[in-house]
Amino acid sequence: MTTEDVRRPAPVTTELSRALDVLAGRTVGVLTGAGVSTDSGIPDYRGADSPRRTPMTFQDFVGDEANRRRYWVGSHLGWKAFASTRPNAGHAALAALETAGIVTGLVTQNVDGLHLRAGSRRVVELHGNMRGVTCLACGSASSRAEVAQRLERDNPVLGVPDGVELGPDGDVAPRAWQTVSVPGCLVCGGILKPDVVFFGEYVPAAWTRAAEEIIDAAGALVVAGSSLAVNSGLRLVSRASRRGVPVVIVNRGATKGDRRASVKIDAGTSETLDALAQGLQERL
């Protein structure tokens, strides 16, 4: 899917006009969630049409070798399928606003890396990314591509089946995983874990501080494609609200931050962000 595939003009609504009035002349920090990537073919955990999923928790991952084996097979297939996804019009719009000097930083709850691939530069991936792998014992870092190569070398049967159903975290439900050999750390033999924040795991303090710096430096906050059901995102909205800066939320359906919003736009993120980008740049 390309940017052009989802470039639909957003209707000029009262909410869109109000958002442009609120944001014009301000620097903008952005917080994005899974809804920004749905037009790229990556589903949202909490959308109305989302498949029911039971994501791996950190405790399950570290506590049981069978769980790690199941996770690594599913995550490997998901990681390979992620490589075929492309940024959509929403990602492109935010990158363009950063180039124009309007967006001064972006915090994302997504692990797909699409903001970086779209050209956004100051990005905090609050829940991690799928590009790296770290040893939980010695802290050695390696690339996901390197670990994937080892995984496929040791398990020739692994491939990308047709019709893989992605999850927002890049995991899929593998059909068979019980006999798969999972690579360990080449330095100490310890447990390897993708650089993704699992359910039940704390967001590293350095990532939280970097996200807060973006929110604190901006004159307004735009939240796009997040229900704000996860506290790491909701806390950033509360932080902006306490500073008294306007908050614009773009999301289909209610969010936990709606009462803090100066403007709420209940619409798709791709077309709405594209319209906001065009409108704000016209007002420069």
Image: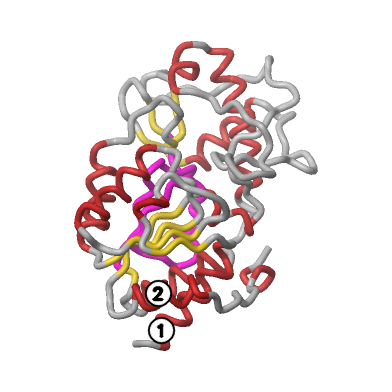
Q: CA distance from mark 2 to mark 1?
A: 8 Å
Residue 27 or 56: which is nearer the viewer? 27
Q: Position of residue 67 (x, y in %)?
A: 56, 17
Residue appearing at x 32%, y 68% in the figure: 28
Residue 254 lies in magenta, yes or no? no
Q: Which image quadrant is residue 153 in?
A: top right
Range covered by the magenta-colored residues: 104-133
Q: Position of residue 208 (x, y in %)?
A: 27, 43
Q: Is residue 74 above or below residue 42?
A: above
Residue appearing at x 55%, y 62% in the figure: 269
Confirm whether residue 134 shows in the render.
yes
Report the quarter where the C terminus lies. Answer: bottom left
Q: Position of residue 55 (x, y in %)?
A: 56, 28
Q: Label for residue 281?
A: 1
Q: Which image quadrant is residue 198 in?
A: top left
Please give the residue where the numbered disc 2 appears in the rendered image.
97
Confirm whether residue 153 shows in the render.
no
- Identified by mark 1, the residue type is Gln
Q: Is residue 87 above or below residue 165?
A: below
Residue 240 or 209: which is nearer the viewer? 240
> Mark 1: which secondary structure?
helix
Residue 132 lies in magenta, yes or no? yes
123 sits to left or right of 86: left
> Mark 2: which secondary structure?
helix
Report the quarter where the N terminus lies. Answer: bottom right
Q: Residues within 10 Å of mark 1 (few under 14, many from 20)?
A: some
Q: Position of residue 255 (x, y in %)?
A: 47, 47
First in sequence, mark 2 or 1: give its number. 2
- Identified by mark 2, the residue type is Leu
Q: Residue furthest right?
A: 162
